[in-house]
């Protein structure tokens, strides 16, 4: 077993932050674009660990907003590999919130599949390293 096995075998927490007033519209709902950007940060970090190189976002598929996110919610993104190609990694990202920070109860609010491509210093796609099976 290598030290990268957890990235290949299970959903991992990749980001945790708080939704702040600057992230919301006047009604107090957090902008979907802010949530998408947090998911992209989480997925990119996760994909980079797997690719062992720089990665770029090339697609977002099946974005589903299940419930709103509000100011003060603790927002957590969890990532797992959906599939890999020669140069690409599709990452399923789920976003969960805790509305009461003194509780362990979390609510799934969003999910999507983001696709990243491994690139070299010149931003040219390059093959992923051989991943353990």
Image (cartoon, rainbow, N blue to C red):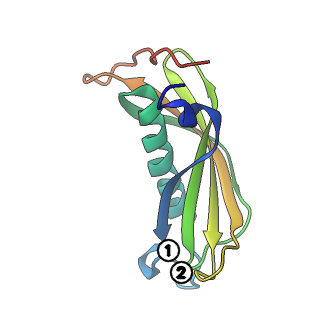
Q: Does 36 sit above or below residue 8?
A: below
In the rendered image, residue 104, in percent from the top left (x then y), is placed at 66, 73
In the rendered image, residue 95, in percent from the top left (x then y), is placed at 62, 58
Q: Which quadrant is the N terminus positioned in? A: top right
Residue closer to the observer: 86 or 76? 76
In the rendered image, which quarter is residue 81 located in?
top right
| Drawn side of residue 123 relative to residue 57, left or right | left
Question: Going 41% across and 35% down the picture, which residue do you hit?
Answer: 48
**Which structural element holds mark 1?**
loop
Question: Going 25% across and 22% down the picture, which residue do you hit?
Answer: 122
In the rendered image, residue 7, in percent from the top left (x then y), is placed at 54, 36
In the rendered image, residue 42, in percent from the top left (x then y), is placed at 48, 49
Q: Does 16 sit above or below residue 18?
A: above
Residue 111 appears anywhere in the view = yes
**Residue wearing tag 1:** 19
Task: Give the alpha-carbon distance from disc 2 to disc 1, as whole Å.
Answer: 5 Å
**Which structural element holds mark 2?**
loop
């Amino acid at each position: 077993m290598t030290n990268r096995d957890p990235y290949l075998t299970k959903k991992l927490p990749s980001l945790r932050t708080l939704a702040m007033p600057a992230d919301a519209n006047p009604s107090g709902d957090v902008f979907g674009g802010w949530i998408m950007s947090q998911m992209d940060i989480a997925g990119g970090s996760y994909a980079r660990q797997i690719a062992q190189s720089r990665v770029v976002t090339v697609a977002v598929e099946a974005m589903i907003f299940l419930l709103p996110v509000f100011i003060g919610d603790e927002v957590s993104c969890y990532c797992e590999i959906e599939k890999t190609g020669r140069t690409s990694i599709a990452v399923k990202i789920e976003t969960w919130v805790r509305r009461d920070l003194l509780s362990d109860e979390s609510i799934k609010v969003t999910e999507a599949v983001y696709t990243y491509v491994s690139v070299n210093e010149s931003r040219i796609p390059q093959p992923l390293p051989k991943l353990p099976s």
